[in-house]
Image (spheres, coloured by chain):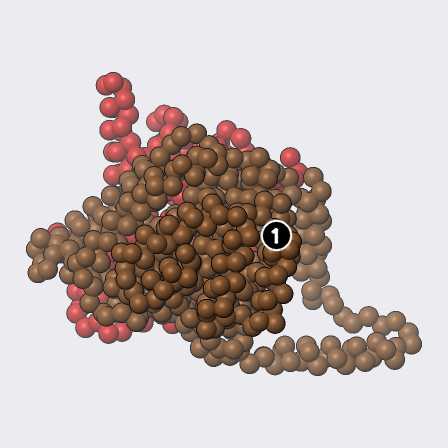
Amino acid sequence: MAHDAGLIALSVLEALFQLGLLLVLAPVLGWCLDGLPFWLAGRAGGAVRFRLLGAGRFWKNLFQTPLSGRPALALTMGLLALVCLPVVTTGSVLSSLADPLVMGLMLLMGRGFLGPGVLSGEASRLVPAVLLLCLTEALIALSAPGTDGLGGLCAMLHIEPEPGLEGALAACALALGIACPPLRSEDVTGMLSGVRDRQEREAARSIADVLNCGWLLLLADLAWPVSVGLAQGGVQGWWLGLVALAARLTLAVAVAVGLRLMAQERSARLTALFAGVALLLALAGRFGT
Amino acid sequence: MVPACVRVIQPGRFGQAVVVCLAALAAVLALSPAVLAVSLGVIAAQERDACPAVWSVPVLLLSVLFPAQTPVLLGLLPVLFWSALVRRRDGGCSAVMSILGVSLVWHAPEAVSAELVAGLGVGVLGLIGWSVLGARRPGNLGLLRPVLLMVLVVAAQDEGLAVCARIALEAAFLDLATLVLTVSLGLRFPALAVLRLPFPPLPGLVVLWLGIHAALGMAAGVEGWSVLGVIVALLLGVLALSDLLVVGRQMSGGQAAISGVSVLLVGAGSLLLPALVFGLTSPALHGVGGEWVWPVWSIGAGDGSHFRLMAFVMVGALIWIVLVRPWRIMGGIVQAASTLAPALMTLLASGDVLFEEAPSLGWSLRRFVVSGRVRFRALKGMKAPVLPDLRQGAVGLWLVLLGLVLAVLGVMT
């Protein structure tokens, strides 16, 4: 009994740790997405310090004044994604809620509630993204029946590697990244066109960072599910999971920035190509065994 | 029976309409296919925007003569959904038509499910293509989803996959329940249409999730359903996207302010509707198959994955309430929730852009058409074989060939 209680307390602690870590990482990732292309081109962007300070101000304000309903819903979606998705190991308390379709649709809905307006051309991102999420869910159910969400998938792939499914998921993640790239700072500016209040604008930017972090994490988890540690891995497995998290997120940011620099974002042809590759790999993996 | 319920729904008598629709579902499911055909004929005669008689009369006759044949079933679909999908009229009748379509498929266990899925898919894609070219929004394509789910039920029962059939039946019942709720209470509470959206944690997402898992459960159990299962999953995704458009249109007709009762109904619906529907229809569900469970805390998909809806809603609601702190603002939680409606409306309206303007064929496509004509003419007068340069499309060609091989492999094994 005491052993069980200890395990539950550990999983709750892990969920809180993962939430805190990702909330600190969110502004850093946001800076990478916005500033890294400028930095690579040899131009000066804002320092990462300002981004972190802005996020700190946002959270401090949040304790004093409550948010209004709409941005609060967007932030709720982001926080739920960060706390549910498997991050370091699969042993956090809410990781059983992390279904790829549910998490993806939740983050897409959060994007819609970020500002009073939506992005121009949001429909042309939403439509392929929803279809790709359905495809991802279908391929997981096809190639690995019996797994329960992303956490179960990570655990299963540790025990029984399935290269066809892993390749298909990586292709799906790439297609999702191409069809629906993370929000850029000018996107957020466009969505906030009617908002005058400075505090509200800064809050929306911080919430966009949280949503972007959730989206990148979902894509990274889909692209490389084996790198998530097992719940029974012990201390060494936990540290390994932490290192793998850093590697996974770095890879996701590098791919997102690379796609942006090469102007390959939202290319319908590439999206269809990678979706087709995912389907072929999954079918090949299924019939090959 | 059926014309009476149509008459009840049209003026908008809310409470009775729900009861009558549920009674109609139960009665029609239990009735014989011949009675179904007669009721179809009666409705087709009463409806103003019904299918043209040139099509509907022979098909209805055929459906009496040869009940439960796949081509006849597919031919009956336009008779059922003409006013909703071609004339794009919303109304109580459409829900009844959806129920009738479900029971038609239910009474046709020997129909070929692959052909039905193909017919439904071609119909959906054709209707969407027609609306894109005509620059009009498509009708309520979500009405076809219960029929598609029922095809899954019949196919799974045919193959002896009882669990899979039950999951698909759960999804179909939940979808019909949201449809009937939206139609019957929609005049008074337009916000209830939100329940059909495929966003978490609304019941529309539960339907989508259950449907995808049921389709792929068939793929795991039956050889030959791998490709078909993925196609059904994508079709469900397309139908979910069309729900976004329809709900946006239905909600924009109502007033902007949202009453407290609507907020309560949407909240309670997203939390309790799946459990309520599965509980009420449990005799039918367990008659179809599976062990006796009442999915309240976690909805199982039959293949090992679970959707823990209650935990999800409760954690999300807790975070949102802590962020909003409704006890510190005027109007409390209702005020905070009604600020969500305009944002949701803009999100839903973003899809209308796709149907605003008819696409003019781009120059590359026109050039393609014209050059195709020229090549065809050149082909006729050709002496020596000179092949056109197709090296650009080589990768695509290989992918298509590989896909064909795998699809054949999937069908053969």
Q: Which chain is brown in the rendering?
A: B
At x 26%, y 33%, the residue is A12
Question: Relative to A211, is B46 on the left or the right?
Answer: right
Determine which residue is flagged by label 1: B67
Q: Tell me the colour chain A is drawn in.
A: red
Q: Position of residue B394 (x, y in %)?
A: 71, 61
The secondary element bearing badge 1 is classed as loop
Viewer-closest of A157 and A261: A157
Q: Position of residue A87 (x, y in %)?
A: 36, 40
Q: Quadrant of the C terminus of chain B?
A: top right
Query: Would you identify the image quadrant in which residue B56 lies?
Result: bottom right
Q: Is residue A259 visible?
A: no
At x 28%, y 40%, the residue is B311
Query: Would you identify the image quadrant in which residue B2 lies?
Result: bottom left
Placement of A45 over or under B195, stated as above or below = below
At x 32%, y 52%, the residue is B19
Viewer-closest of A128 and B118: B118
Viewer-closest of B222 and A246: B222
